[in-house]
Amino acid sequence: MSTRVLKAMPLDRETFSPYGDVIETDGAAQFGINAGTIRRFHDLATVDVGEAPPARVAISITRSLQCITLPYRIPLLERHPLGSQAFFPLDHEPVLIVVASPGNKVSPGDVKAFLTNGRQGFNYHRGVWHLPLITLKVAQEMLVIDREGPGNNCEEFIFAGDELVLDL
Amino acid sequence: MSTRVLKAMPLDRETFSPYGDVIETDGAAQFGINAGTIRRFHDLATVDVGEAPPARVAISITRSLQCITLPYRIPLLERHPLGSQAFFPLDHEPVLIVVASPGNKVSPGDVKAFLTNGRQGFNYHRGVWHLPLITLKVAQEMLVIDREGPGNNCEEFIFAGDELVLDL
């Protein structure tokens, strides 16, 4: 089995669009609110949790206890068939993202990696394969906006060996 | 007409609970995810946008172009009858919050003010009167999670004069 080294590219809205939304002000539509004292960069991501109720949207925070080192063997991807999942960094730290197109299987050749600039959030569309959250530093915090509700909302695709290694 | 000086108190989950959720890790329920590498402080706030569709949850960013100075005359409060509205600071800056209980009118004696610690987000429950977003510095950014959809989702209660002045 050959190993593919997956190089992360800078995250940008257009390249990421098949997988989800980039939550950033650069290049976003905006308008004034509150008598012009505030700019609102509006509707940067849609939260999709299917039928509500029984589902609802919850806001959570994650904090990393361990970080990864590069190169990093990608052990698996996961997907959430019932809803989107958004992350926004609370510490201005870059975040590595790995995604693959929806479908029942993941082809290693279809996997892509991105690195955020520390001010970008991202929202995986429902069903998009992605690497479970990893961080490059310990104690990195992220705001998470995703689905809370009944049903199995996490599926995994496990790589057998070293098919994919992530690097910068 | 007498003027009431409203002193902001530190934001805490219990005191704020009649008005909404405090989005912070301190004191929150948590569990491990991703093989124990990440702590998840789960479900810190519920996003409530009523029937979806036609409503949906959108993620936006606000940036202040102007800031206020203290003491600050409170000109009005607003409320969103169709959905909750969550804010999370992206710059670790404290934020002033002014709220009043749901109801058709606002009584100046019922209004309360809070100051966040710079790491706290907050989620106004549907229908809770609140001061439109103000900031103590220019270019402060906030992540906003609220409702996108048809219908009039903003009502205002305008104070006639200097009934309420906000200060620290």
Image (spheres, coloured by chain):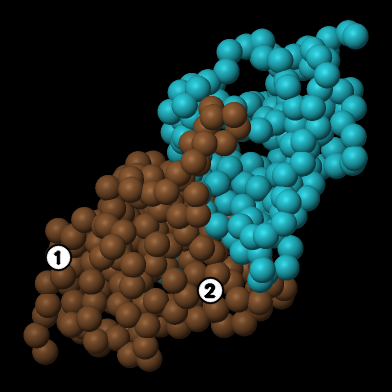
Chain colours: A cyan, B brown
Q: Label 2 belongs to which residue? A: B83
Secondary element type, mark 2:
loop
Secondary element type, mark 1:
strand
Cα distance, mark 2 to mark 1? Answer: 28 Å
How many C-alpha atoms fall within 10 Å of the one at disc 2: few (<14), some, or many (≥20)?
many
- Answer above or below: position of B34 versus A33: above
In x, y percent, where is residue B18? 33, 72
In x, y percent, where is residue A151? 72, 57
How many C-alpha atoms fall within 10 Å of the one at disc 1: few (<14), some, or many (≥20)?
some
Camera-side residue of A157 and B129: A157
In x, y percent, where is residue B46? 51, 63
Q: Label 1 belongs to which residue? A: B7
Question: Of callouts 2 and 1, which one flags the residue occurring earlier in the amino acid sequence?
Answer: 1
Of marks 2 and 1, the one in the foreground? 2
Q: Which of the 4 image quarters holds residue B97?
A: bottom left
Q: Quadrant where the N terminus of chain B lies?
A: bottom left
Amino acid beneath label 2: Gly
Query: Dot 1 falls on which chain?
Result: B
Relative placement, left or right, of B72 versus B53 is: left
Establish whether labels 2 and 1 are both on one chain: yes
Indicate which disc residue B108 carries: none
Amino acid beneath label 1: Lys
Q: Quadrant where the C terminus of chain B lies?
A: bottom left
**Residue B63 seen in render:** no
Camera-side residue of A13 and A168: A168
**Residue B39 seen in render:** yes
Relative placement, left or right, of A11 versus B96 is: right
Camera-side residue of B162 and B116: B116
In x, y percent, where is residue A76? 75, 27
Residue at point 38%, 45% (across, down): B25
Residue at point 14%, 65% (across, down): B7
Query: Dot 2 falls on which chain?
Result: B
